[in-house]
Image (cartoon, rainbow, N blue to C red):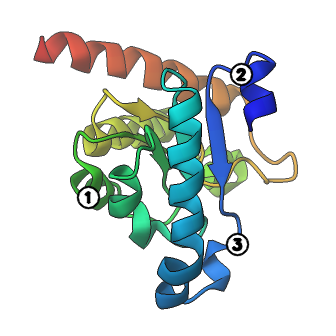
Amino acid sequence: MSAQEEAGAHMLQLFEAMGMMLEEKEFYEFAMPCLEKIATELKSRYPDVPLMVFTRGACYANEKLSKMGFDVVTMDGDVDRSTARATVGDRCGLQGNYYAAELIEENGKTPETVKETAKALIDELGPQRLIANLGEGLGLGGKESTDLVQVFVDTIHEYSEAKIKESA
């Protein structure tokens, strides 16, 4: 990860992609100390570089991760958004977790349904300290509609800006 920063990365992301393979007790015993050590070391070397973490299947650890020096924690696609925001508070940002299936026309999705669900994401997580993205990426085998993807991106930008102005 140091090589990434030294090559010009503007943010570093740490993945614990197998978090779901450990029971919670084992995750805290084995994975968490490693994540903390890595976060501490990277923050001491590069204090101005944002550090993001994703613990697939172990989002129960997000509160502790938000207190360990990570600037952003990533939510799994199935995590309740309001709970996630309440869990990390203002300590760090959140990344996630729009449902990619909302971008498939075959599922009956339309620009109107995408606008509605994208706005719900912002309403539940707030427009600040948020990286709005797909919960687990596209992974839809090309079924996603590029038009609906564009509606998602545009709605996130426009609605976030409106909500920020509203609260100013």
The residue indicated by pointer 1 is 87
- Disc 3: CA contacts within 10 A as few (<14), some (14-19) or many (>=20): few
Horizontal side of residue 85 vs 12, given as left or right: left
| Residue 150 falls in image quadrant | top right
Q: Which of the pair 163/111 is nearer the observer?
A: 163
Horizontal side, residue 128 vs residue 74: left or right? left
Q: Nearer the viewer, residue 127 or 32?
A: 32
- 3D distance between C-alphas at marks 3 and 1: 22 Å
User: Is 28 left or right of 14, judged from the image as shown?
Assistant: left
Identify the image quadrant of residue 8.
Answer: top right
Question: Residue 23, how many percent across, how many down?
Answer: 55, 89
Residue under circle 2? Answer: 9
Crowding at dot 2, Cα within 10 Å, few <14 / some 14-19 / many 20+, comes out as few
The three-letter code of the residue at mark 2 reads Ala
Q: In the figure, 23 relative to 43: above or below? A: below
Q: Which mark is residue 99?
A: none
Q: Earlier in the sequence, mark 2 or mark 1?
A: 2
